[in-house]
Amino acid sequence: MGFKIHATPGTASALREIGSLEVETCYRIEERKSPDALDLMRRGMIQLVINTPTATGGAVLDGNMMRRLAVELNIPFVTTMAGAKMEVEAIAEMQLGTPEPRLLDISTLE
């Protein structure tokens, strides 16, 4: 679809294995190195965050920090694979020029 994907080492490796995706590796936030997800978000290099952390460990804390910054910067943030799939499908439809559905105001219908 033409997007640049940034991911931490484990996720980047998994994405490379399952397909021919080009993935830029960034540091985990807890490593305190640059660039990490927060750096990339602040630089305007991230337009969508897909974060599906494990139930424990540093990934949860990283997710909390990313979610907080995403809200401040108005970056969409998805936390489930089902949600990620729907977002990707919606972006693909938009790229094809499919019109957005509109809600009807039924109070104006006779």
Image (tube, rainbow, N blue to C red):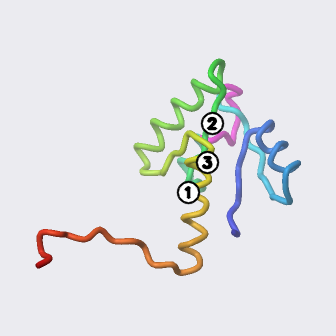
Left or right of 98: which side holds 21?
Answer: right
User: Dot 2 lies on which element?
Assistant: loop
Q: Amino acid at mark 1?
A: Glu
**The N terminus sits in image quarter:** bottom right
Q: Amino acid at mark 2?
A: Thr
Which residue, given by chain and number where applicable, does mark 3 sit on? 40
The dot on residue 38 is none
**Residue drawn at x 54%, y 45% as measured from the top left:** 78
- Residue 59 vs 92, above or below: the answer is above
Spot the residue most to the front. 110
Residue 65 picture location, percent across and down: 52, 31
Q: Which residues are magenta?
A: 30-37
User: Dot 1 lies on which element?
Assistant: helix
Q: Earlier in the sequence, mark 2 or mark 3?
A: 3
| Residue 31 included in the magenta stretch of the image | yes
Which residue, given by chain and number where applicable, does mark 1 sit on? 87
Label 1 or label 3, whichever lies nearer to me, is: 1
